[in-house]
Image (cartoon, rainbow, N blue to C red):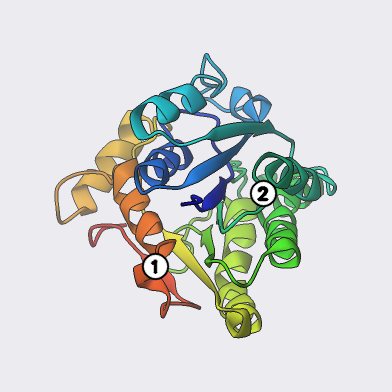
């Protein structure tokens, strides 16, 4: 039987949510197209994966039997979403699942805000995500499973004054969820958004870790696998009646 195919963006660090989602989807029987852009990680304090994610396809294939293709593209380029889908369709002929996990983060409060950073963050987090959904819808075979999962943050649950470009762009995805879901529902394509809460992907310093632990009822940070299990379920056959939802999966914490 032909395996369904998932495109997962933002898979350039093996410790990250995207890589963990990919592993779970592979185990669930999907073939995979993994998108990454290591130069974006290299600009951040946590740095890029030394292998640039290049080892991940082989690891997933070995453990799950999935076919896995890796695509590198800078989603700040407005042509990149179409190019990523071109590569996916060339490799597999179809895409059944889109997980838009990529994100740009920057520490800019009101006093340090710049137009350049606002525009770049919107381009990557919001514009690229919308264009990816557009490409998915344009190329999707409605006889097959159709699942879209976006990712947001905690901007709707509490203030994040030090990350204004990030929360503005992620808030936009939150608000787009219901409209995208309604538009694609007649084609039986579901659209949902996941807020994974504070997740331990190697970015937090000691102060941030302590702040979360003080407020986390379950006494731990979220793990990438927590988000991956939910996203995997949303992309599967049992979630066909769930659409237009923004789901918080954070252990009851911040």
- How would you rate the neighbour count of disc 2 (Cα within 10 Å): few for under 14, some for 14-19, many for 20 or more? few
Q: Residue furthest left?
A: 218
Which numbered disc, 2 or 1, marks the residue closer to the eye? 1
User: Along the polypeptide, which appears first: circle 2 or circle 1?
Assistant: 2
Q: Dot 2 lies on which element?
A: helix
**Depth order, front residue of 146/225:** 146
* Residue 162 visible: no
Residue at x 55% of width, y 30% of height: 12
**Depth order, front residue of 243/46:** 243
Q: Quadrant of residue 131?
A: bottom right
Residue 210 % position (x, y): 25, 39
Q: Dot 1 lies on which element?
A: helix
- How would you rate the neighbour count of disc 1 (Cα within 10 Å): few for under 14, some for 14-19, many for 20 or more? few
Residue at x 32% of width, y 60% of height: 249
Q: State the quadrant of the C terminus.
A: bottom left
* Residue 91 visible: yes
The circle on residue 237 is: 1
Would residue 254 appear left or right of 163 to someone viewing this image? left
Residue at x 40% of width, y 57% of height: 231
Residue 246 % position (x, y): 45, 71
> Is 44 drawn above or below residue 66 in the view shown?
above
Q: Quadrant of residue 75?
A: top right
> Is 35 drawn above or below residue 195 in the view shown?
above
Q: Residue furthest top?
A: 50
Residue 49 % position (x, y): 51, 20
**Depth order, front residue of 230/70:** 70
Residue 218 % position (x, y): 14, 53
> Is 212 drawn above or below residue 132 in the view shown?
above
Q: From mark 2 to mark 1, how far is it between C-alphas?
A: 47 Å
Q: Which residue is mark 2?
A: 111
Residue at x 54% of width, y 36% of height: 11
**Depth order, front residue of 138/155:** 138
């Amino acid at each position: 039987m032909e395996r369904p195919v998932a495109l997962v963006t933002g898979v350039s660090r093996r410790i990250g949510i995207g890589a963990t989602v990919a592993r779970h989807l592979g185990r669930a029987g999907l073939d995979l197209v993994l998108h990454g852009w290591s130069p974006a990680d290299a600009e951040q304090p946590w740095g890029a994966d030394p292998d640039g994610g290049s080892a991940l396809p082989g690891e997933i294939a070995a453990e799950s039997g999935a076919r896995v293709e890796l695509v590198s593209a800078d989603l700040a380029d407005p042509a990149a979403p179409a190019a990523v889908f071109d590569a996916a369709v060339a490799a597999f002929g179809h895409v059944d699942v889109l997980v838009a996990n990529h994100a740009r983060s920057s520490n800019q409060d009101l006093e340090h805000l710049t137009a350049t950073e606002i525009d770049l963050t919107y381009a990557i987090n919001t514009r690229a995500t919308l264009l990816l959904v557009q490409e998915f819808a344009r190329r999707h075979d409605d006889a097959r499973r159709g699942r879209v999962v976006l990712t947001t943050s905690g901007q709707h649950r509490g203030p994040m004054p030090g990350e204004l470009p990030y929360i503005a762009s992620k808030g936009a995805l939150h608000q787009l969820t219901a409209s995208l879901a309604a538009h694609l529902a007649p084609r039986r394509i579901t659209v949902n958004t996941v807020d994974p809460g504070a997740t331990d992907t190697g970015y937090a310093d000691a102060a941030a870790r302590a702040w979360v632990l003080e407020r986390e009822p379950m006494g731990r940070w979220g793990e990438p696998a927590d988000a991956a299990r939910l996203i995997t379920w949303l992309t599967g056959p049992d979630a066909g009646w769930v659409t237009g939802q923004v789901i918080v999966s954070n252990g009851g914490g911040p």
